[in-house]
Amino acid sequence: MKFSDIPGQIATKEFLKSLLTKERLPHAMLFIGREGSGKLPMAVALANLIQCQQPVDGDSCGECPACRKTFKYIHPDIFFTFPTIARDEKGTPSSAMAPEWRRVVLEKMYFNLNGWRKFIDEEKKQLNIPLVSIREVIKFCSMKAYEGSRKIVLIWHAELMEKEGNRLLKLIEEPPPDTVFLLITDHPEQLLPTIVSRCQIVQLPPFHEEDIGWHAQNKLGLEMEGRNAQIAMANGNMTAFLESLEEGNEILNQELVEWLRIVYKGQASPMLEWSDRFSKYNKDDQKHFFKFALGFFEQLFLSFHLEQSQLKVDEKSFDTIQKMKSILDIHKTIQVIELLNDNIQYIERNASQKLNMINSSLTLHKIMIARESEKR
């Protein structure tokens, strides 16, 4: 992975390159940003550049002995720590799942916790970074570099260290010589404040639509005809776009339409059945559904101001938008958008999703009916 493999994010790349050029690389960096903004690829590209023996134009050469190892994720001086599934009471160290990790990052660099669960076929298990993984980091830091000039510890979803992160505080505050920590998180607020305060923050913005298009065309070899709506619905999230290629938006669209029909009718039994089924989805699938719904209603809002050709939706979604406009006006649409944003926040706070979905369904029903009452 090189910086040149990552679309856009020019300012972030230039900043990271300048740190190396000016020899001002901090001993600990925290990559933050929304899901799908390229935090993992950016941190990996930086780690690879640090170890590269013959950089070219501020990027990894991809050909030296070090690059041949870093590009296969087998460089002995780069240690990856990531969430694992507990296979016994002590937890599973990252090293025990290193083969699976190497396969997933070689196959697809843009993925989330749910994608990682699916890759290891453990979709309903809890992921965390256990104490045994932290001990591995401490042991790695106690050793000398084998081949490179620095040892690098990369921790993906560092917020899942939870209280175990306390054991790294001393190392991050006073690391061994030539040791660099690269921490990655979607939720910096869930990290220990003492860890955040000891890191150089690197904040990545969402990708621009043209960046996602560039990746689709140049890295995936896709024809761009008919992709604009799919790219727009990703809302700057590369992971969401790639998931839509694998799974298609058709299933999500069907689920959304089904939910809207059930809610509009307002019958208790179907709403309870839907809420019960939804509560059995894992947390990431629930968020994915609401983010897709949010993208749909944002386009519905824009449709009150723009022509069809200016919207980022396919023909089927546009037909659904036209039907919804007979029920929701622009003010009610804003209420729905606020409701969906709240739902995403509730999921992140681990609220009961069955109760949340029941409440959301009833609230959305009231919004829909209020519009009908006004018309009458």
Image (cartoon, rainbow, N blue to C red):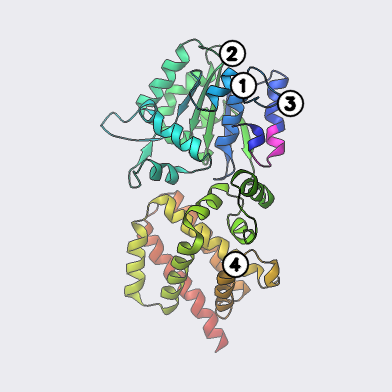
Mark 3: give few (<14), some (14-19) or many (20+) Cα within 10 Å: few
Mark earlier in primary sequence (2, 4): 2
Please state, as top left, top right, bottom left or bottom right, where the C terminus lies in the image: bottom right
Residue under pointer 4: 314
Residue 149 shows which numbered tag? 2
Please name the amino acid that badge 1 sits on: Ile
Query: Which residue occupies the foreground of this view, 63 or 328?
Result: 63
Residue 11 among magenta residues: yes
Instruction: Please report the residue visible at 60 percent of the width from the left and 54 percent of the height from the top.
Output: 235
Label 3 to label 2, Cα distance in Å? 20 Å
Which residue is disc 3 drawn over? 57
Residue 286 can be seen in this image: yes
Q: Would you call the spot at circle 1 few (<14 residues within 10 Å), some (14-19), or many (20 or more)?
A: many
- Which tag, 2 or 1, sits closer to the chain's start? 1
In the rendered structure, which segment of residues is drawn in magenta? 6-13
Q: Earlier in the sequence, mark 1 or mark 4?
A: 1
Considering the numbered disc 4 on the image, is that residue within a helix, a strand or a loop? loop
Q: Is residue 321 above or below residue 244?
A: below
Tag 2–tag 1 contact (CB < 8 Å)? yes
Residue 79, image x and y in percent?
A: 48, 23
- State the residue position of label 1: 50
Q: In the image, residue 232 lies at what x, y percent?
A: 62, 58
Q: What is the spatial separation of the Cα atoms under label 2 and label 4, in whole angstroms?
A: 51 Å
